[in-house]
Image (tube, grey):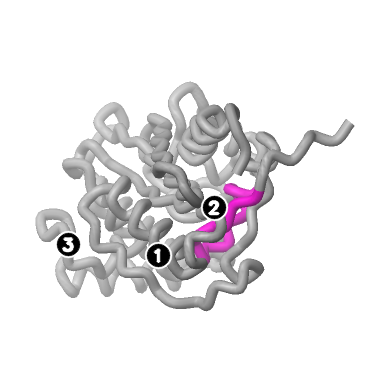
Amino acid sequence: MAKERAGTMVAATTNRHKIAEITAIAGLFGYDVLSREAAGVPDFEVEENGGTFEENSLIKARAIFDWLGGSAATVADDSGLAVDALGGAPGVYSARFAGQKEPGDFAAGTDGDAADFAAADRDDEQLHRSRQDRANNAKLVRLLADVPYEKRTARFVSVITCLRPGAEPIVCRGEVEGHIGFSEAGSGGFGYDPLFIPLGYGKSFGVFAPEGKNAISHRGRALEKLAAKLAAGTI
């Protein structure tokens, strides 16, 4: 028997990888997700100037919710990688770590960033992934080059914000702990997935099948919390 649909949400992100994960995971809990394009929202850029995942998640959700005139539920994800040996960097700057000017203590200089993008261009096995993702990973590998495995602890963080007409915002945070590998492994996922090895597993998220990753991922855990909070009603 098909699962009864609980409601529809518009995803604030334009990242096709995030949309795919949010759609797959939300579907497990009975929710349908529309992309911004499908909902008729133009492809304008939202300035993510918050200092935390929570702030940026709300900024993105609010921008799309307001554009829709508050007429439809909107769900936004802000996520990233926090590496303990780097004091929590790249954090909210995860998407543009290579070439990012902040936080200054961890951003490489011009020469370092140029080397990271050059390394990305030479990474023949990962050319199906974006150049920015490849450069971000190259920078992370370079900065952690002398850090032993036991000190390469890190966590993926996802904060999901759901705005609904006439209701208070729902904010849910999900995390998954792990270590940063010494080199990329696997061609699946996106972002830092080929470097992130979740605790209890001997392989990176880049090796996981999508459904396996979704079952334990930071985004999956945040969406599971969101589904639980929405379970008492519909949107």
For residue 228, which quarter of the picture?
A: top right
Q: Percent x, y for residue 83?
A: 27, 41
Is disc 2 in contact with disc 1, using a CB cutoff of under 8 Å?
Answer: no
Q: Percent x, y for residue 229?
A: 51, 30
Secondary structure of the residue carrying tag 1 is helix
The residue range painted magenta reads 8-23
How far apart are the two marked residues, 2 and 1, measured between alpha carbons?
12 Å
Q: Amino acid at mark 2?
A: Ala
Secondary structure of the residue carrying tag 3 is loop
Q: Percent x, y for residue 8?
A: 65, 50
Q: Amino acid at mark 3?
A: Glu
In the displayed structure, does residue 171 sit left or right of residue 89?
Answer: right
Residue displayed at 68% across by 49% down: 32
Residue 63 is marked as 1
Residue that mark 2 sits on: 73
Q: Percent x, y for residue 196?
A: 43, 41
Residue that mark 3 sits on: 102
Most foreground residue, 69 or 199:
69
In the displayed structure, does residue 91 sit left or right of residue 37?
Answer: left
Q: Amino acid at mark 1?
A: Ala
Mark 3 Cα-neighbour bin, 10 Å: few <14, some 14–19, many ≥20: some
Most foreground residue, 88 or 188:
88
Mark 2 Cα-neighbour bin, 10 Å: few <14, some 14–19, many ≥20: many
* Image quarter of the C terminus: top right
